[in-house]
């Protein structure tokens, strides 16, 4: 039994040794597989990093050397018709502000017929003044006319009878002359009475405050019961024809470019609507303090335009044909304004220019370009004259 026990133990120990060897081999094989997988992953990553991520745009072209050429966006602006405009601000007012007051002797206001904001026609009554006394005077004068006409008719009848009897010798020539003078005096008294009645009626008519022209009532400064007269001042203000104007303040230089009749666009502050007008008057003098003058822009009647309001105006003073560039393409330094263009050899060239009108659409170039050049659109400050680039043309849109 001792031999059997010893043999069994030896066999067990040999099996354990064999198991440890197998496990060690398996572990070694696993490490080799993992290391190979990691190496493959690293190789794939390196391939994509050095081959797949390369930008074709920056790859050196054949014969250009190892250094990549920078890409720049260029435009060919061409020529456009550009309006020369002047921007200004000012105050709205009635073009013809007509104060309306009492034309006659005045009196107590009995009725006011219009309100501010009403449209009135020429000759329309705006207010009436109490006229009972003047009406009685008119009736009295009308009665006097009837009396004078009766006397004139009687004098004419007596003259006719005298003329019938003068040939018979019953009435002398002197009597006929007296009766003729009596008849003429009676006729004259009729005419005097008629003139007095017409005067009284005219005075009564002047008691009505009437509009001198068609237009818009801007202000009403009278109420019923108020005593008014020639010294009372204006009772109403009317904008003749409803026309408004913008009194635009311009510098001396801009004023010299404006002429009567040029078109203008007026936009009231706080409104999105614009209205077309034209300059109807240019100030002949310049304010010595501000060095500014007035350009008056007439505007047809519009309900949204109110005197006293503030508005801006764009005045068109002419038009030119010139290239139009975005503001990013125009640079400046102590030598003046300039742009970068790309020549036929794809070299950057500095080109001095003179700018003109600046609008929301871009900058007009009045000198230095003919419109056919390839102009660097932007980022010109990062380029240097003589540098070779790769131009990418883009449509000249603003």
Image: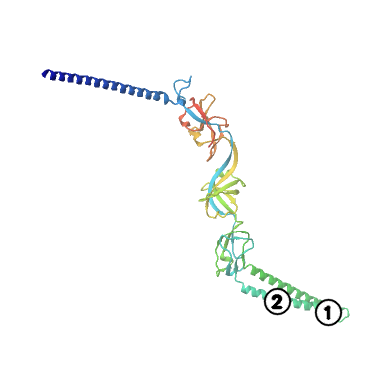
Q: Residue at x 66, y 70 (%)?
A: 201
User: Is residue 330 visible in the rendered structure shown here?
Assistant: no
In front here: 250 or 353?
Answer: 353
Count of marks placed on residues: 2
Q: Answer left or right for 170 relative to 4.
A: right
Above or below for 304 versus 134: above
- The image shows residue 153 at horizontal and vertical percentages of 78, 77
Q: Residue at x 22, y 21 (%)?
A: 19
Q: Residue 54 appears in which quarter of the rendering?
A: top left
Q: Which residue in the rendered view is the most extreme toward the right?
A: 168
- The image shows residue 337 at horizontal and vertical percentages of 51, 34
Disc 1 from disc 2: Cα separation: 26 Å
In front here: 98 or 8?
Answer: 8
Q: Which mark is residue 161?
A: 1
Q: Secondary structure at mark 2?
A: helix
Q: Earlier in the sequence, mark 1 or mark 2?
A: 2
Circles 1 and 2: CB atoms closer than 8 Å: no
- The image shows residue 123 at horizontal and vertical percentages of 64, 63
Residue located beneath label 2 in the image: 144
Q: Which residue in the rendered view is the most extreme toward the front?
A: 1
């Amino acid at each position: 039994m001792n031999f059997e026990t010893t043999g069994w133990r030896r066999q067990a120990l040999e099996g354990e040794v064999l198991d440890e060897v197998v496990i060690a081999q398996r572990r070694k094989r696993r490490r080799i597989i993992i290391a190979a997988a990691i190496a493959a992953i690293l190789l794939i990553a390196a391939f994509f990093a050095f081959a797949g991520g390369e930008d074709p745009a920056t790859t050196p072209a054949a014969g250009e050397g190892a250094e990549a050429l920078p890409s720049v966006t260029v435009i060919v602006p061409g020529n456009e018709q550009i309006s020369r405009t002047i921007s200004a601000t000012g105050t709205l007012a009635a073009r013809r502000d007509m104060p309306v007051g009492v034309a006659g002797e005045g009196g107590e206001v009995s009725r006011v017929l219009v309100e501010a904001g009403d449209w009135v026609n020429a000759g329309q009554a705006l207010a009436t003044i109490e006229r009972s006394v003047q009406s009685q005077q008119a009736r009295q004068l009308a009665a006097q006319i009837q009396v004078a006409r009766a006397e004139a008719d009687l004098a004419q009848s007596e003259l006719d009878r005298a003329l019938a009897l003068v040939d018979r010798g019953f009435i002398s020539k002197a009597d006929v002359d007296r009766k003729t003078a009596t008849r003429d005096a009676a006729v004259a008294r009729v005419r005097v009475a008629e003139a007095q009645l017409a005067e009284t009626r005219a005075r009564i008519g002047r008691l009505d405050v009437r509009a001198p022209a068609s237009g818009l009532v801007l202000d009403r400064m009278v109420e019923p019961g108020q005593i008014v007269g020639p010294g009372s001042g204006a009772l109403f203000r009317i904008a003749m024809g409803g026309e408004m104007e913008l009194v635009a303040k311009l510098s001396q230089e801009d004023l010299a470019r404006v002429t009567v009749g040029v078109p203008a666009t007026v936009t009231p502050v706080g409104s999105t609507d614009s209205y077309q007008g034209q300059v109807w008057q240019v100030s002949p003098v310049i304010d010595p303090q501000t060095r500014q003058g007035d350009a008056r822009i007439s505007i047809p009647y519009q309900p949204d335009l109110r005197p006293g309001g503030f508005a801006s105006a764009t005045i068109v003073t002419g038009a030119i044909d010139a290239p139009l560039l975005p503001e990013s393409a125009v640079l400046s330094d102590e030598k003046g304004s300039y742009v970068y263009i790309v020549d036929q050899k794809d070299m950057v060239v500095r080109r001095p220019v003179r700018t003109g009108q600046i609008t929301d659409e871009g900058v007009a170039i009045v000198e230095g370009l003919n419109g056919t050049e390839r102009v660097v659109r932007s980022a010109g400050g990062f380029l240097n004259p003589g540098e070779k680039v790769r131009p990418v043309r883009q449509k000249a849109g603003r």
